[in-house]
Image (cartoon, coloured by chain):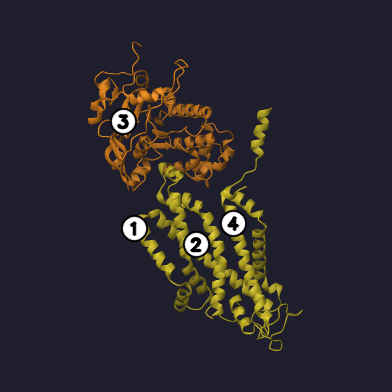
């Protein structure tokens, strides 16, 4: 497998009146061709901003990508001209936003919005675009696509709108799709359907997928590798299997403990992570997670742990793990 | 069975577009429809004026000056023996043309300037808006008088002069709308699909900001008509013998105590037309606001 996208030391700050918000603070990850990776973390930890930074769609002038490299097929996207970048968006990399209600323009028909990308990048006519849109709508499982393309977004249900968003995202057959919490606003059954649809499509076209979510249940089923983010940094990453069965960072442990699992006795209590995510303007000097960490030792307050490999292909930024101490592990499992 | 009936239910459901919905809502508003009917009626009367009345607006009959309403002259005659009814419906041409053409000019100038200003942002936006502020601060009538002395006295120049002083409101409105819409998710989505700035402004932002613009334009039409009437009243509007409601009101005003009907008919006509446009504007505002949807 060859690397499709390589994000290196990406740093995106927002300059606000209160100070500099370090939304993404030196994040690195990579995606292989056709692979699905997951970016996991709670709200406000920088998942979405790091994804928007790849497409250079961070809201300016407040938000700015300070340093880093985003190598896509060997080309640094951050060095492209505005026009060159525009040609990448939608054609090579596309994104599915989390709010299908607000991400579709209320005054344009669904068909028009699907064919737009094709008109931008392939220079095809509107009428050919409509034909293509019918085909795409059928592919994402909307009945009567030939009639439905003339509908407006308000005539679609939430799940159908998200299907339409998927159709828009795959229209130009991009090599990478970023799905930003694609199933947050729909109910669980539709959620499963949509994720299966995304999985099948990425498998069919060999598209790589960055799945941004806070739902660890989704991650286990769909992602090859997992990157856990906390306060703008990646605190742990590894294969989905490793991260699930042998987490190295107490934050990941907390996330796992707060999700119901079928493979554990039903009496097991769900444990929330106490406290609030830190203020991204004034981060603690040491480990960002230390104020909420029940295993913290004095060193955690003074020094920031680096993201190091603890076992092959499994990295974590935690002083305890790096020293082989894992008090959260169950004995002899 | 259940599935087939559901499929049929989907297929027979009527197709509602955004504008279609607005029209349905407008139709239910009797005041707005009344206003629209009056405007259409007056437009037809203005267009077919030669068919409706045997008199022309300039034809003088010095044997029948200052007559009251009669079978021959429905609204009487003025001090030159011209038929008031004929002058009123020919004058409607002037008033309606002023209303519509000035607003076309307003849209042609105000819409692009507002849109460019909002989309460009930063310095460009700042410069354009300061210019708009200057235009806004300048007294309208004074500016029109200045423009009239530069542009000359033809009726088209009146359209142009009124248009040139009234585009600022629309440009501000459009700018505000687009500034607001710019941060919507679907704009990011369109950018994420590789949309160009110009395309996004034109296809995504402008159509979404049109509702308030249409309402504003409808409210501005009576203002333009009134401005023209005011200009004619002070003698710098449409030049005689071309009839204008403002000039007719001024003629009538001189004889307000002896021949009140000379003032009454054009004044009522002007009031009704303004009211009609205001009702229509109100109705459009309600119809185009999805929040008021029942």
Q: Is residue A105 above or below residue B253?
A: above
Q: Are marks 1 and 2 in contact (CB under 8 Å)?
A: no
How many neighbours does mark 1 have within 10 angstroms: few (below 14), some (14-19), or many (20 or more)?
Answer: few
Left or right? Give the position of A48 relative to B155. Answer: left
Chain identifier of the yellow chain = B
Q: Which residue is under mark 1?
A: B123
Q: Are marks 4 and 1 on the same chain?
A: yes
Q: Are marks 4 and 2 on the same chain?
A: yes
Q: Which residue is under mark 2?
A: B107
Instruction: Give the Cα distance between marks 3 and 2.
Output: 59 Å
How many neighbours does mark 2 have within 10 angstroms: few (below 14), some (14-19), or many (20 or more)?
Answer: many
Q: Secondary structure at mark 1?
A: helix
As drawn, the label of residue B284 is 4
Work out whether mark 4 precedes mark 2 in sequence or the reverse, and give the earlier one.
2
Chain letter for the residue marked with disc 3 in the picture: A
**Quick one: which residue is furthest to the top in this view?**
A332
As drawn, the label of residue A108 is none
Place of residue B140 in the rendered image (x, y in percent of width and height, measured from the top left): 47, 72
């Amino acid at each position: 497998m060859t690397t499709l996208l390589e994000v290196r030391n990406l740093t995106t700050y927002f300059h606000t009146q209160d100070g500099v918000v370090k939304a993404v603070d030196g994040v690195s990850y990579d995606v292989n061709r056709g692979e699905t990776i997951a970016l996991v973390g709670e709200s406000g930890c920088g998942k979405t901003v790091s994804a928007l930074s790849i497409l250079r769609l961070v809201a300016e002038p407040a938000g700015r990508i300070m340093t880093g490299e985003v190598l896509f097929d060997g080309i640094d996207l951050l060095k492209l001209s505005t026009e060159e970048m525009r040609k990448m968006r939608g054609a090579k990399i596309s994104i599915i936003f989390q709010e299908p209600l607000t991400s579709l323009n209320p005054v344009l028909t669904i068909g028009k919005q699907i064919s737009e990308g094709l008109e931008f990048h392939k220079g095809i006519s509107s009428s050919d675009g409509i034909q293509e849109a019918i085909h795409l709508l059928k592919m994402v499982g909307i009945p009567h696509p030939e009639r439905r393309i003339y509908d407006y977004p308000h005539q679609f249900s939430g799940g159908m709108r998200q299907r339409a968003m998927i159709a828009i995202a795959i229209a130009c057959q991009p090599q990478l799709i970023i799905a930003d919490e694609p199933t947050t606003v729909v109910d669980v059954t539709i959620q499963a359907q949509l994720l299966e649809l995304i999985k099948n499509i990425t498998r069919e076209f060999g598209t790589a997928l960055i799945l941004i979510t806070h739902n660890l249940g989704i991650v286990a089923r769909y992602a090859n590798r997992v990157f856990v983010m906390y306060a703008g940094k990646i605190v742990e990453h590894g294969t989905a299997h490793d991260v699930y069965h042998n987490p190295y960072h107490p934050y990941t442990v907390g996330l796992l403990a707060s999700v119901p699992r079928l493979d554990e006795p039903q009496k097991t209590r769900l444990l929330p992570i106490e406290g609030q995510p830190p203020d991204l303007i004034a981060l603690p000097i040491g480990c960002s997670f230390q104020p909420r960490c029940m295993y913290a030792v004095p060193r955690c307050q003074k020094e920031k742990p680096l993201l190091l490999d603890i076992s092959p292909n499994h990295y974590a930024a935690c002083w305890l793990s790096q020293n082989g101490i894992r008090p959260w592990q169950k004995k002899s499992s | 069975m259940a599935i087939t009936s559901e499929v049929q239910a989907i297929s027979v459901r009527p197709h509602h577009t955004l504008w279609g919905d607005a029209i349905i809502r407008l139709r239910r508003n009797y005041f707005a429809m009344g206003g629209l009917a009056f405007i259409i009626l007056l437009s037809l009367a203005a267009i077919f004026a030669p068919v409706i009345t045997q008199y022309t607006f300039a034809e003088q009959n010095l044997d029948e000056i200052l007559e009251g309403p009669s079978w021959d002259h429905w609204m009487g005659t003025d001090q030159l023996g011209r038929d008031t009814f004929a002058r009123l419906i020919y004058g409607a041409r002037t008033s309606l043309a002023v209303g519509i053409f000035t607003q076309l000019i307003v849209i042609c100038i105000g819409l692009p300037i507002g849109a460019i200003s909002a989309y460009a942002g930063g310095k460009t936006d700042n410069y354009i808006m300061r210019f708009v502020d200057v235009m806004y601060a300048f007294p309208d009538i004074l500016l029109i008088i200045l423009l009239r002395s530069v542009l000359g006295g033809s009726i088209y120049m009146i359209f142009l002069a009124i248009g040139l002083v009234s585009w600022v409101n629309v440009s501000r409105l459009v700018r505000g709308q687009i500034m607001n819409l710019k941060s919507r998710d679907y704009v990011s989505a369109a950018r994420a699909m590789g949309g160009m700035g110009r395309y996004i402004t034109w296809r995504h932002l402008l159509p979404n900001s049109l509702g308030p613009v249409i309402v504003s334009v409808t409210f501005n039409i009576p203002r333009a008509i009134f401005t023209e009437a005011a200009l004619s009243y002070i003698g710098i509007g449409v030049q005689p013998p071309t009839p204008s409601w403002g000039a007719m009101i001024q003629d009538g005003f001189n004889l307000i105590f002896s021949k009140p009907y000379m003032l009454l008919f054009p004044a009522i006509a002007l009031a009704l037309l303004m009211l009609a446009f205001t009702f229509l504007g109100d109705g459009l505002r309600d119809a185009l606001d999805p929040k008021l949807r029942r």
